[in-house]
Amino acid sequence: MCFFSPIRPLAMCAQVCYHRRRKSACAPFRTQTRRTHSMQAFEFYCPTKIYFGKGAEARVGEAVKHFGGTKVFIVYGGHSAVKSGLIARIEQTLTDAGLEHMSFGGVQPNPRLSHAREGVQKALAFGADFILGVGGGSVMDTSKAIAHGVANPETDIWDFWSKKAALTKTSKLGAVLTISAAGSETSDSAVLTNDETTLKRGLNTDLQRPLFAIMDPELTYTLPRYQVGCGVVDIMMHTLERYFNPGHPSNRMTDEIAEGLLRTVIDAGRVAMQDSHNYDAMSEIMWAGSLSHNNLTGLGGVKDFSVHQFGHELSGMFDAAHGATLSVMWPQWARYVVDTDPARFAHYGEAVWRLTRKDGESDRDLALRAIDTTEEFFRSIDMPTTFTELGIGVLSEEQLRELAERCTFFHTRVVGKFCPLDYDGILAVYRMANK
Ligand code: NZQ
Ligand code: ZN
């Protein structure tokens, strides 16, 4: 068994050297000791121009023109952006700016490859030179796929996701955000579900960071409560998946930004769940959503993102909402890996949740309280923390094994960096959620 993580066999814990290094070279992580570590190197690239504030969508024509678009292919989702009148307003703004446009709706949550392929054909037939996503992560990721397809008509877009082809060029892309969650409006990521295989897969490249993002918090007032909650969880998770990484203690500035962002989203999330028309709360959440996934909260460290990998398999197999899969899986993952670095989790409890260490309380006990507190917060905003609450019921052993196999890309990878998990580890974490 692993000395530092007694719940796992030694062979599964790739963190042993790291643990030993930390034990000998690093004092337990405390605010006052962090300064002894030198600043870690990083690259930061966030080219997206942000137009933030009430009525910002009126500037969409100006923004497209600024970036040289002339024929705009507008991508949107099911019905919310049509019902609210947003699509009509955007079309009018583009017309007023002298820009040709064509609209393409029907993007579903957990966006499908077949629909993106259809979008590529329509955008090519229209002669689009600018792709404009109006919606959330699903719309933006479809827009990214369409942008790639238009720039590379000879390549099937799934080849970019399955790594058969390398993406070297794309089309111009902009975003009008209607839900604060995925952060796709500034991120380097796009996630699609292949409807033939039900595999949900991500593509990461700086090429697909949008040129601009229009962010009017009032556009999120119509969100259903459940989607507000999913968004709050997803935004927290984009920072937490960077916060727990083997490189820490990394840059103090990065940690302070991460902790401030988490506290802000937690506070604003509580308000937003009661009142989605609260401008201040919806604004804080919207800006945090972009900052949480443009890499600012992870500078100097590496991304872990194992909880996202668990979640993507749940979405692929059961079409579960992304944020909801994360609120189920994070507490399980955290309990499974807590012994990798209890001091880091303890510090998280103190810095983010303002927990006070009790007399004689160990790092591990405080760490577990921090994890429990996070889970209680998810429950308090009506987010699921078990498979039953997620709406997929208690799974059979066969289903759990299938999830774990998919998550290892059929035994070809381990997931995570903080504590890399192989098939057995992944299966164990899924089992913990299976109630
Ligand atoms: O389709 P409509 O009718 O617009 O309804 C949507 C949808 O049902 C609704 N909605 C959006 N804005 C609304 C609204 N309803 C009322 N008023 C509004 N203003 O919300 C529902 C969910 O929309 P979706 O776009 O799916 O949400 P989200 O932004 O959470 O995106 C989730 C997708 O993004 C991926 C996820 O995996 C998932 O597929 N992610 C993308 C990332 C990226 N590209 O960087 C990173 C994330 O980790 C995530 O993986
Ligand atoms: Zn996410």
Image (tube, rainbow, N blue to C red):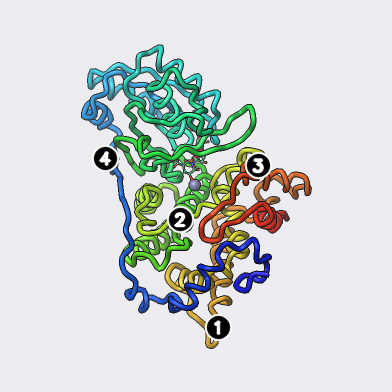
Question: Which residue is rendered at x = 71% and y = 55% of the image?
Answer: 431
Q: Which residue is mark 2?
A: 269
Instruction: Please state the horizontal and vertical placement of residue 346, each as a whole percent of the image.
Output: 50, 73
Compare marks 1 and 2 and give the one earlier in the sequence.
2
SS label for mark 3? loop
SS label for mark 2? helix
Q: CA distance from mark 1 to mark 2?
A: 30 Å
Q: Which residue is mark 4?
A: 49
Ligand 1 within 8 Å, label 2 CB: no
Instruction: Please state the horizontal and vertical placement of residue 58, each as a whole percent of the image.
Output: 27, 32
Q: Which residue is mark 3?
A: 410
Q: Which residue is mark 1?
A: 361
Question: Which residue is rendered at x = 47% and y = 69% of the image?
Answer: 348
Compare marks 2 and 4 and give the one earlier in the sequence.
4
Q: CA distance from mark 4 to mark 1?
A: 47 Å
Instruction: Please state the horizontal and vertical placement of residue 167, each as a whole percent of the image.
Output: 41, 31
Residue type highlighted by circle 4: Lys
Residue type highlighted by circle 2: Gly
Crowdedness near tag 2: few (<14), some (14–19) or many (≥20) residues, C-alpha within 10 Å: many
Question: Which residue is rendered at x = 58% and y = 30% of the image?
Answer: 194
Q: CA distance from mark 3 to mark 2?
A: 37 Å
Compare marks 3 and 2 and give the one earlier in the sequence.
2
Compare marks 3 and 4 and give the one earlier in the sequence.
4
Look at the numbered discs 3 and 2 and tell me whether their residues touch, using CB distance below 8 Å: no
Crowdedness near tag 1: few (<14), some (14–19) or many (≥20) residues, C-alpha within 10 Å: few
